[in-house]
Every structure is written in structure tokens, then in C-alpha cells.
């Protein structure tokens, strides 16, 4: 992750994710880390450039987040973005994002001497909960899942031949 102010001063930071993360998770983690750093530096207006089309389009409302973990990342990023006066997230071609590629390599590097003056943070847990489970109370009655659960738990099939076949 790289922050550049109006005078072209750069702050670079690499983060190694010490947990299972998809490429999209890693993109969101980098965004969240950068947003938090910008807040610490009292930045009020921010332009974010990323080569992750999925993340940029999700943040900008063009794509819908699919999957509960991606939705959690999107909501987390949106909560942080709301703390700024203005944040613009723009998609750039991967070729124009060479600095991010270099930092990604550093984040996966095990040789501390190769990092030079770029700080390396080890992030042991995701910025969002691993699982978000709703609390269900009371009897909700039969749903489309009831026969499936009965089959899994008890091995019983519905009496109707077509229902059992499903």
C-alpha cells in the first residue's frame, strides 16, 4: 500500500496476511489498511487508485457484493470511507499500478533484508469476522430446508415421490 500526498511524498507499507485470504480479501485488506493509515494522518479527502475491478465497482455501487465475507469487507470499507469528507475510488490498469505489485511481493517475502525501509506488518486476523451467524430463536416452522435437514439428521425422505426425488 502506498500513500502519496499532493507534494508527491510517499509512505509505503507492506502487510503479510497470516490467515487464509482470497485475492479479493487481500485487496479489501489493503484498502482498509490504507484508509486507516490515511485517517491516522488526518487526511480528509482521498483519491484511491486500485487495479481490482471487483473491489472498485463494489465500493462504487456498480457491482453487488456476493458472499457474506465480501459483504462484510464492503461494509467495513464503507464505514471507514464515511469518516472522510470525500473518497474517490478509481480503477486503473494493472500496468499503472507497479508500486502495488512491488509491495505485494515484499509482503509475501520472508527475507527481512529485502524490505529495506518499507515497514512490514504481519496481520494475524482479518479485518472482518471470520463468520457472522445470526441468532435464531423460537420455532420458525417448516421451510424449504426442513426436508433436507430431516434427511441429513435422520435419513428420512418425504412421503411424496417427487418431493423425495428433489
Image: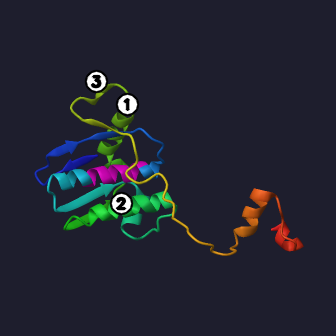
Q: Which residue is mark 3?
A: 113
Residue 126 as seen in the image, left or right of residue 80 = right
Query: Which label's residue is closer to the chain start, 2 or 3?
Result: 2
Secondary structure at badge 3 equals helix
Q: Which residue is mark 1?
A: 109
Q: Which residue is mark 2?
A: 76
Q: Nearer the viewer, residue 23 or 76?
A: 76
Q: Nearer the viewer, residue 162 or 54?
A: 162
Q: Residue furthest front?
A: 138
Which image quadrant: the C terminus?
bottom right
The answer for how far apart the CA atoms under marks 2 and 1 are is 27 Å
Residue 59 as seen in the image, left or right of residue 120 = right
Point 46% across, 59% down: residue: 70
Would you say residue 89 is visible in this rendering? no
Q: Position of residue 48 (x, y in %)?
A: 27, 58
Secondary structure at badge 1 equals loop
Q: Position of residue 135 (x, y in %)?
A: 52, 65
Asked which quadrant contains residue 15, the reply is top left
Part of the protein shown in magenta: 26-35
Crowd class of label 1 (few under 14; some 14 to 19; many from 20; radius 10 Å): some
Amino acid at each position: 500500500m502506498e500513500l502519496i500526498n499532493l507534494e508527491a511524498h510517499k509512505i509505503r507499507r507492506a502487510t503479510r496476511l497470516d490467515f487464509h485470504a482470497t485475492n479479493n480479501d487481500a485487496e479489501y485488506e489493503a484498502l482498509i489498511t490504507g484508509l486507516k493509515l490515511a485517517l491516522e494522518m488526518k487526511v480528509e479527502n482521498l483519491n484511491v487508485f486500485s487495479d481490482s475491478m471487483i473491489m472498485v465497482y463494489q465500493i462504487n455501487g456498480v457491482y453487488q457484493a456476493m458472499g457474506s465475507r465480501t459483504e462484510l469487507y464492503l461494509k467495513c470499507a464503507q464505514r471507514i470511507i464515511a469518516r472522510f469528507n470525500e473518497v474517490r475510488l478509481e480503477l486503473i490498469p494493472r500496468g499503472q499500478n507497479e508500486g502495488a505489485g512491488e509491495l505485494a511481493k515484499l509482503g509475501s517475502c520472508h527475507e527481512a533484508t529485502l524490505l529495506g525501509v518499507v515497514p512490514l506488518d504481519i496481520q494475524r486476523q482479518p479485518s472482518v469476522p471470520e463468520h457472522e451467524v445470526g441468532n435464531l430463536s423460537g420455532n420458525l416452522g417448516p421451510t424449504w430446508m426442513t426436508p433436507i435437514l430431516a434427511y441429513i439428521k435422520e435419513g428420512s425422505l418425504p412421503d411424496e415421490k417427487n418431493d423425495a426425488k428433489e
